């Protein structure tokens, strides 16, 4: 996100991340990355459930080929899961993304199929700018 922040801003697109946890936990997690102001605390997963996102079968966490591939890509980019700060049940939450227009209408929704399944920020920038036209 940091690399594309100005592109989203220039396009007039506000990006927000809904994060499991109360406000203090979200701040502690996101502040070191400079993203605390973009994160919305969602401790009860209301947004997650409202969007219809599901949970991952944790029995597949070490055998899912697509998840393994994404994990290697993330590791090569310098990212990894902080399991010390993750509740097992929260680790099963599948990711998702949505483009919501200025009237609050969901114009595009993506529901991940494994914990690392989310379009890149550049893909989401293209989708959002296409809808914003």
Image: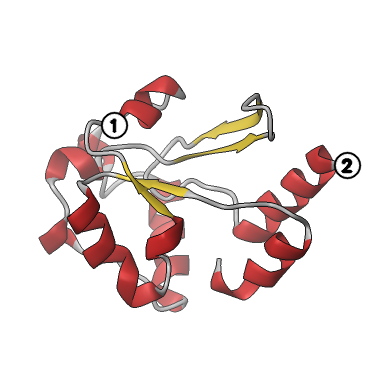
Residue 80: x and y, percent? Answer: 31, 68
For marks 1 and 2, give the CA distance. Answer: 31 Å
Secondary structure under tag 1 reads: loop
Label for residue 133? 2
Q: Position of residue 97 (x, y in %)?
A: 53, 40
Corner quadrant of residue 99: top right
Q: Which of the 4 quarters of the picture holds residue 132?
A: top right
Which percent across, then down, holds residue 32?
A: 32, 76
Nearest the viewer among 75 and 118 is 118
In percent of the image, x 69 and y 35: which residue is there? Answer: 102
The mark that comes first in sequence, 1 or 2, is: 1
Q: Residue at x 39, y 30 (%)?
A: 47
Q: Position of residue 10 (x, y in %)?
A: 77, 64
From the image, tell me which residue sits under label 1. 45
Q: Quadrant of the C terminus?
A: top right
* Disc 1 packing (10 Å; few <14; some 14–19; many ≥20): some
In the depicted structure, whether residue 3 falls above or below residue 37: below
**Does any portion of residue 108 appear in the rendered image?**
yes
Viewer-closest of 89 and 5: 5
């Amino acid at each position: 996100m940091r690399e594309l922040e100005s592109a989203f801003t220039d396009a007039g697109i506000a990006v927000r991340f809904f994060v499991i946890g109360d406000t203090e936990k979200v701040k502690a997690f996101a502040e070191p990355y400079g993203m605390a102001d973009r994160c919305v605390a969602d401790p009860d997963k209301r947004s997650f459930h409202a969007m219809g996102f599901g949970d991952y079968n944790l029995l597949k966490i070490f055998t899912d080929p697509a998840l393994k591939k994404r994990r290697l890509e993330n590791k090569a980019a310098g990212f990894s899961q902080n399991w010390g700060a993750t509740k097992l049940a929260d680790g099963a939450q599948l990711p998702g993304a949505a483009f919501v227009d200025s009237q609050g209408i969901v114009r595009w929704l993506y529901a991940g199929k494994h914990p690392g399944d989310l379009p890149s920020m550049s893909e989401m920038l293209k989708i959002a700018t296409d809808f914003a036209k």
